[in-house]
């Protein structure tokens, strides 16, 4: 359940600005995915549904940071998308205390190639403008790293001699690396507005990876300077993993969805 509480706005560099060409272009885009999450967790063959809104997740979040970066050379590019978040809750109970924390890291690398459209797409020394009707299409391969660290501490004095004191402290880590394959379609709408639709498939049960993950996103960029844009959109991501049959069936299917907002700096 915790794997997808917060994650990323991959490929925030939507659109194809009409600028002077050059060999290299770069993108830096801090962002936030304001998502809720829900799904089904299966333990020993028993399904348990859950649903957390963005407000629920925000109340549990103590810190977080998300960023997307890209370096492009002509038709080739490499990108990094990272999410770091800490969630936690503590509560006084029966004269004692219960605390838990969740530390999450999601890091994604992509290696892509432009199949359709101009080699170069960045706001540089030329006019910051999209070309209406201009179409770009990229395809990419990559890998995504997931890591979730859980810590739980329970310290209850009890009611001796009837109820003994309880002291429990433990931690667990879940991590894997999964392959990715994906594509991105970009379209200039007006001289100042562009959009992108992009998605990927991953997991495929490779090693410790999930059986299947998929992501589908749409973003719109509004250019307000030679190098700057504001990005808005929606993203949905699904992670599914299951093993065993009958009463030995264990796993989960989790869908995370919500709006994404970010600031994009291109040079």
Image (cartoon, rainbow, N blue to C red):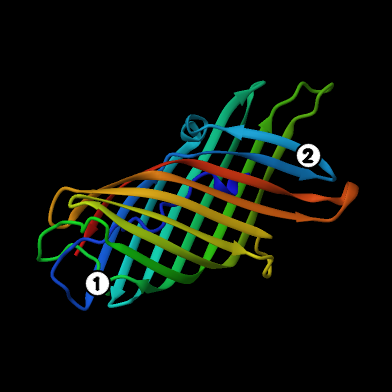
Residue, disc 2: 47
Q: CA distance from mark 2 to mark 1?
A: 49 Å
User: Is disc 2 surrounded by few (<14), some (14 to 19) or many (20+) residues within 10 Å?
Assistant: some
Q: Is residue 48 above or below residue 84?
A: above
The location of residue 150, given as percent across then percent down, is 61, 48
Q: Earlier in the sequence, mark 2 or mark 1?
A: 2
Residue 105 visible (yes or no): yes
Residue that label 1 marks = 120
Please provide percent x and percent y for residue 22: 17, 76
Q: Secondary structure at mark 2?
A: strand
Q: Residue at x 38, y 66 (%)?
A: 137
Q: Can you see residue 14?
A: no
**Can you tell which mark lies on residue 75?**
none
Residue density around tag 1, few if under 14, some if 14–19, many if 20 or more, within 10 Å: many
Q: Which numbered disc, 2 or 1, marks the residue closer to the eye? A: 1
Quarter-of-image position of residue 41? top right
Q: Which residue is the extreme one toward the right?
A: 246
Quarter of the rendering containing residue 117: bottom left
* Quadrant placement of the N terminus: top right
């Amino acid at each position: 359940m915790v794997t997808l509480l917060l994650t990323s706005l991959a490929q925030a560099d939507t659109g194809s600005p009409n600028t002077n060409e050059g060999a290299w272009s770069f993108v830096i885009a801090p962002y936030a995915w304001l998502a809720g999450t829900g799904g089904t967790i299966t333990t020993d063959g028993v399904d348990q549904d859950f649903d957390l809104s963005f407000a629920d997740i925000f109340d549990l979040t103590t810190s977080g940071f998300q960023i997307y970066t890209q370096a492009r050379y002509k038709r080739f590019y490499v990108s990094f998308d990272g999410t770091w978040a800490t969630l936690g809750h503590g509560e006084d109970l029966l004269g004692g205390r219960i605390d838990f924390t969740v530390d999450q890291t999601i890091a994604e690398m992509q290696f892509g190639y432009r199949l359709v459209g101009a080699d170069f797409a960045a706001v540089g020394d030329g006019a910051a403008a999209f070309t209406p009707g201009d179409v770009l299409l990229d395809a990419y391969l990559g890998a995504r790293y997931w890591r979730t660290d859980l810590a739980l501490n329970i310290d209850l004095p009890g009611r001796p001699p009837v109820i003994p004191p309880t002291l429990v402290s433990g931690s667990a880590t879940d991590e894997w690396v999964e392959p990715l394959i994906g594509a991105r379609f970009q379209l200039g709408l007006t001289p100042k507005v562009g959009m992108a639709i992009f998605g990927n498939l991953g997991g495929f049960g490779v090693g410790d990876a999930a059986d299947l993950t998929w992501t589908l996103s749409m973003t719109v960029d509004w250019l307000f300077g030679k190098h700057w844009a504001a990005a808005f959109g929606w993203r949905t991501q699904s992670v599914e993993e299951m093993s065993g049959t009958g009463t030995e069936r264990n796993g989960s299917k989790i869908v995370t969805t919500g709006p994404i907002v970010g600031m994009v700096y291109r040079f």
